[in-house]
Amino acid sequence: MLLFVNAKETAIVAEGVRYLRIEGTFYCGIGCLFLLYGLYRGLGKPGMSVVLTIFSLGTRVALAYILSAIPAIGVVGIWWSVPIGWFLADVIGFAYYAKIPCVNTESPR
């Protein structure tokens, strides 16, 4: 944080630390999402990667507006919208994977 702001700007540093703690705690969510992107590309379904990206981003933007407008939540709602968007896209990605038929169910001959 100190690369970008003066150490005397403690409110900015504190908000940056809060952002990094929230995002960092749930970073496995974006990791799962990247795994799903690769999975669907490998399965020959790259469109699903696009769907998950659009859903994740759209959810994050919508939630950022909605949550930050609540006075009790404020700017922290923006930080929380990111991992929530990752999680929801992960749920959709895994649910879709559970519904698609297996690619190769026969044993090799």
Image (cartoon, grey):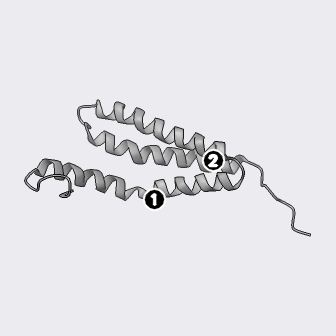
* Residue at left offset 23%, top offset 32%: 71
Q: In the rendered view, does 41 fall on the left or right side of 89?
A: right
Q: Could you say whether the residue bearing mark 1 is in a helix, strand or loop?
A: helix
Mark linked to residue 67: none
Percent coordinates x, y for residue 12 in the rendering: 16, 48
* Residue at left offset 47%, top offset 54%: 29
* Residue at left offset 59%, top offset 42%: 50
Q: Earlier in the sequence, mark 2 or mark 1?
A: 1
How many marks the image carries: the answer is: 2
Q: Residue furthest bottom?
A: 109
Percent coordinates x, y for residue 42 in the rendering: 68, 56
Identify which residue, 5 or 77, lies in the foreground: 5
Q: In the rendered view, does 97 fall on the left or right side of 21?
A: right
The residue tagged 1 is: 28
Percent coordinates x, y for residue 80 in the rendering: 35, 45
Percent coordinates x, y for residue 22 in the rendering: 32, 53
The residue tagged 2 is: 95
Disc 2 marks which amino acid?
Answer: Ala
